Image (cartoon, rainbow, N blue to C red):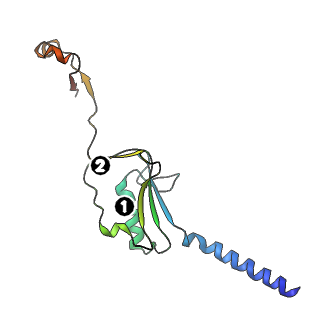
């Protein structure tokens, strides 16, 4: 009986030790949402706002040797991501065969990367002098950007 009790205690201690180390061995997932904030830690409940911030967080993990525990996933949540300038991703941002870095939409097809800015504020032309000069075939399909 004592052998079985000792064995159970040893197994319990081993299981607790493994559970303690499990977070260090787990993969890393960083989250990005258009309504997040780049000052956030990149968690599901407090996501980053930009892809650049997620890339920089992955690079920081690499610099601090915190990527040896498993794959890294950057979960890009649904929405529109306006990229005001090119986003540089180098071969170093790919990880390794054993510890890959994967960027993916959390919902396939729902994240849109836009290489520029949306121009908002368009309104139909209403000035009668301008409308007079337009081809009648254009109808009311002419818009102007209001300032």
Q: Looking at the image, is 54 positioned above or below residue 59?
A: above
Residue 15, percent from left and from top = 69, 76
Quadrant of the snapshot with the N terminus = bottom right
* Residue 83 - label: 2
Q: Quadrant of residue 114?
A: top left
Query: Is 143 positioned to the left or the right of 133 in the image?
Result: right
In this view, the residue farthest toward the left is 133
Total number of numbered discs in the rendering: 2
Q: Viewer-proximal residue, 17 or 37?
A: 17
Q: Looking at the image, is 96 positioned above or below residue 41?
A: below
Residue name at image x 74 percent, y 80 percent: 11
Query: Is 11 positioned to the left or the right of 88 in the image?
Result: right
Residue 83, percent from left and from top = 29, 49
Q: Looking at the image, is 60 positioned above or below residue 2?
A: above
Residue name at image x 47 percent, y 51 percent: 106
Residue 111, percent from left and from top = 40, 46
Q: Is mark 2 on a helix, strand or loop?
A: loop
Q: In which quarter of the image is residue 137?
A: top left
Q: Is mark 1 on a helix, strand or loop?
A: helix
Quadrant of the snapshot with the C terminus = top left
Q: Viewer-proximal residue, 96 or 46?
A: 96
Does residue 61 appear anywhere in the picture?
yes
Residue name at image x 28 percent, y 33 percent: 120
Q: Judge the density around disc 2: few (<14), some (14-19), many (≥20) Cα neighbours within 10 Å.
A: some
* Residue 55 - label: 1
For the residues bearing labels 2 and 1, Cβ distance under 8 angstroms: no
Does residue 41 appear anywhere in the picture?
no
Q: Quadrant of residue 35?
A: top left
């Amino acid at each position: 009986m004592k052998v079985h009790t000792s064995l159970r205690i040893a197994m319990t201690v081993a299981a607790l030790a493994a559970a303690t180390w499990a977070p260090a061995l787990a993969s890393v997932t960083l989250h990005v949402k258009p309504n997040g904030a780049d000052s956030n830690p990149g968690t599901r409940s407090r996501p980053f706002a930009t892809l650049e911030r997620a890339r920089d967080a992955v690079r920081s993990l690499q610099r601090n040797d915190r990527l040896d525990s498993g794959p890294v996933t950057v979960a890009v949540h649904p929405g529109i991501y306006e990229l005001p300038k090119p986003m540089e991703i180098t071969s170093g941002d790919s990880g390794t065969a054993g510890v890959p870095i994967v960027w993916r939409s959390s919902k396939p097809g729902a994240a849109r990367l836009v290489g520029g800015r949306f121009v908002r504020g368009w309104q139909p032309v209403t000035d009668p002098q301008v409308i007079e000069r337009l081809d009648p075939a254009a109808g009311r399909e002419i818009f102007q950007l209001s300032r």
